[in-house]
Amino acid sequence: MFLRRLAVIVPRSTRFFSSKGSLDLGSTIAELNEEMESVFGEPPPEGLANSGNRSCMAQDAHHNAHVILGSTNDKFAAQELSSISHHLGENKPGLSHVGSTGKAQMVDVSPKENSSRTAIASCKVVLGKKVFDLVLANQMAKGDVLTVAKIAGINGAKHTSTLIPLCHNITLAHVRVDLRLNPEDFSVEIEGEAASTGKTGVEMEAMTAVSIAGLTVYDMCKAASKDIQVTDIRLERKTGGKTGYWCREE
């Protein structure tokens, strides 16, 4: 009955929504309340008048709850991220040759204790069958490949600090370079060892020894083939220093 009276009294041109086309629920109900008051001469029942406000308040409370919850979650996530980053930073080994400003530096080893240090490295030079046979028969034009490479490797270990700019100039007690022909893959297997008593390791000396020996093999044989490959330069074992014993796991 109420709706029929309202439909008769209120013209069709009158809209219960905002004249500006707003879809805001609170504004729409407020306009409806004004229309009813102008028609019936009294404000609408309390329940109807406040329903819009309660609806808007509920929507605002729901929105605020989401905002607060989202903010709390973001803050919690940021704290967790910071904690994880800090934990990783504590356990991640640093780059000793990079200073606090990001620039290259030579490590100060003066606070370290002297200890006996050794390192063994290896390298392989893949010759191919033709060159392998020539080296085995000692028929290369430049002479004895393995002997020259052995001397070159020892000499290279003694010049490591000159070749690698941030390496320390250390006194080597011993350098060994051995070369062995492997007929299974037509290669030269090279092993180098360096030893010293001091404040820094000799890993670079051992790896420089096998690297220079491998390059010398290439130089001695390059006239016979350009397919020769110097591969697998790596540290095999080291002793001494803060980290003590280390061995490569196969």
Image (tube, grey):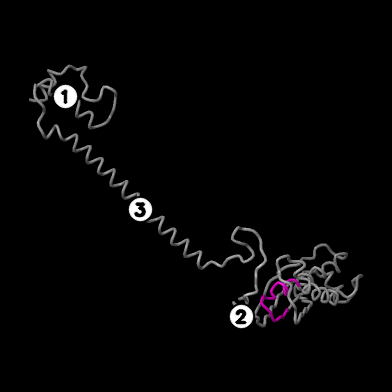
Span colored in magenta: 194-208
Give the left or right position of residue 78, taking residue 66 as reference.
right
Which of the 4 image quadrants contains residue 236?
A: bottom right
- Mark nearer the N terminus (3 vs 1): 1
| Extreme residue in the front direction | 110
Q: Is residue 203 magenta?
A: yes
Q: Secondary structure at mark 2?
A: loop
Q: Which residue is mark 1?
A: 34
Which corner quadrant holds the N terminus?
top left
Give the left or right position of residue 136, taking residue 235 as reference.
right
Q: Which residue is mark 3?
A: 73
Q: Secondary structure at mark 3?
A: helix
| Extreme residue in the right direction | 141
The residue under the point 64% across, 58% down is 103
| Position in image of residue 85 (x %, y %) | 47, 61
Which of the 4 image quadrants contains residue 54?
A: top left
Q: CA distance from mark 2 to mark 1?
A: 89 Å
Which corner quadrant holds the C terminus?
bottom right
Q: Secondary structure at mark 1?
A: helix
| Position in image of residue 60 (x %, y %) | 26, 40
Q: Which mark is residue 245?
A: 2
